[in-house]
């Protein structure tokens, strides 16, 4: 991974080497704002507190100052884009992607990877403050697992189109930003990706607006879908290397616990992406199988799978009726971004000794953990960087109950 030391010229002169869906100029009448960045928030935005307002400015770093143009005000805060820079941070580097300054897909390519990881750890630590204050976890228990590659890792990309333009939608301007030289996609996707920009024949059958998804299926075949549900072919993590790391971490936490589990409950299991390796590892260690129950709403035929909508009001009651077991030594949960508010009721019912909570949204995970009753300790919180160059990350919380 190469790093550059020159400041990113893209913030000084707002030009672009690629076309857009429509003009990306700020709307007339929105005022300019002098800024001085104090810190980075959890969404990768610089935070400025001056001139009587809190302003969020993407693609900036602490210590930087200049002039930005406000494009949105909401609930007492405002959002702006950099127009000119007076002072740049020593942590600023030249972005390795020509689209970075305009593209909404990446957030940290203007600084080095270690600095990015520091911002992510700060964001996670802030989210976990209520649990730190309550004594359920210590700051020393928070660990980071870095990604081996910062670029060229995405095995799945969803692009939006409007008429003949295709790319990512910038929420600030509601424009399609074209990204023909995106650095994030896996090499296997490049031919189909390039064809969307080099050959506009797709516009003949796809008018107006919609979306296209390119992805690698489990057998490594490149697939292309138009205007279908996201991950129509089955959800997979976008970063294969880090997904393998995540599976190793989860498996190690469960199989190397003080008490090896006799039963495992896998909630929001999907196709068993995380729990399958747990079973394989225990089989290698002890040559015995581990009873497992998987629960999710996705169609999946497996003898230990229960098709239940876990967000349904009667989900727990239905589970008790259908499951061969109602109590488990270990519970593994990997919910969607909104988390699982009913977690406490499931833990009280299943009475596990161990919980491994995998989350793509640390805020909802922290909310769910704060609702847990009884005595428990959060032994580890692991930040797994599945999404380098963005503010997103995966979190694994490992709990033990007394």
Image (cartoon, rainbow, N blue to C red):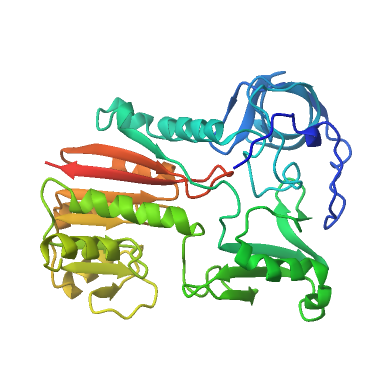
> Residue at 31% of width from left, 64% of height from top?
313
Question: For residue 28, which quarter of the picture?
Answer: top right
Q: Residue 391 at x, y = what percent?
A: 55, 42
Side of 204 where 111 appears, left or right: left
Question: For residue 195, which quarter of the picture?
Answer: bottom right
Q: Residue 228 at x, y = what percent?
A: 60, 74
Q: Residue 341 at x, y = what percent?
A: 34, 51
Side of 268 where 35 appears, left or right: right
Vertical side of 107 occupied by 238: above or below: below
Side of 135 where 394 appears, left or right: right
Question: For residue 130, which quarter of the picture?
Answer: top left
Vertical side of 12 occupied by 287: above or below: below
Q: Residue 310 at x, y = what percent?
A: 33, 64
Vertical side of 144 occupied by 35: above or below: above
**Residue in front for this viewpoint, 315 or 296:** 296
Would you say residue 112 is visible in this rendering?
A: yes
Image quadrant containing the C terminus: top left
Would you say residue 163 is visible in this rendering?
A: no
> Residue at 75% of width from left, 33% of height from top?
8
């Amino acid at each position: 991974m190469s790093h550059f030391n020159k400041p990113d010229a893209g913030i000084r002169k707002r030009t672009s080497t690629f076309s857009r869906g429509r003009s990306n100029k700020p709307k007339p009448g929105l005022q300019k704002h002098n800024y001085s960045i104090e810190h980075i928030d959890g969404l990768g935005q610089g935070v400025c507190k001056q001139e009587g307002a809190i302003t969020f400015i993407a693609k900036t770093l602490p210590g930087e100052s200049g002039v930005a143009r406000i494009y949105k005000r909401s609930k007492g805060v405002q959002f702006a884009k950099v127009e000119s820079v007076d002072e740049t941070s020593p942590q600023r580097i030249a972005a390795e992607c020509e689209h970075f300054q305009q593209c909404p897909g990446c957030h940290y390519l203007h600084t080095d990877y270690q600095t990015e990881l520091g911002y992510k750890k700060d964001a996670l630590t802030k989210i976990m403050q209520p649990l730190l204050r309550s004594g359920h976890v210590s700051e020393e228990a928070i660990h980071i697992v870095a990604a081996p590659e910062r670029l060229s890792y995405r095995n799945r990309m969803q692009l939006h189109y409007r008429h003949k333009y295709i790319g990512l939608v910038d929420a600030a301007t509601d424009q399609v930003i074209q990204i023909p030289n995106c650095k994030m996609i896996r090499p296997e996707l490049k031919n189909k990706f390039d064809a969307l920009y080099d050959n506009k024949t797709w516009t003949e059958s796809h008018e107006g607006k919609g979306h296209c998804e390119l992805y690698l299926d489990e057998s490594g075949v490149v697939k292309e879908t138009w205007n279908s549900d996201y991950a129509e072919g089955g959800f997979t993590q976008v970063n294969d290397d880090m997904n393998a790391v995540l599976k190793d971490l989860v498996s190690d936490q469960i199989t190397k616990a003080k008490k090896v589990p006799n039963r495992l409950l896998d909630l929001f299991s999907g196709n068993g992406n995380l729990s399958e390796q747990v079973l394989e590892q225990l089989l290698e260690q002890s040559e015995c199988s581990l009873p497992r129950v998987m629960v999710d709403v996705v169609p999946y035929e497996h003898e230990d799978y229960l098709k239940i909508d876990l967000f349904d009001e009667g989900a727990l009651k239905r589970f008790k009726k259908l499951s061969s077991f109602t109590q488990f030594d270990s519970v593994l949960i990997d919910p969607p971004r909104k988390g699982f508010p009913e977690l406490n009721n499931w833990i009280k019912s299943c009475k596990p000794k161990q919980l491994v909570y995998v989350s793509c949204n640390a805020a909802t995970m922290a909310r769910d953990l704060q609702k847990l009753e009884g005595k428990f300790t959060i032994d580890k919180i692991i930040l797994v960087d599945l999404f380098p160059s963005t503010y997103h990350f995966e979190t694994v919380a490992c709990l033990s109950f007394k």
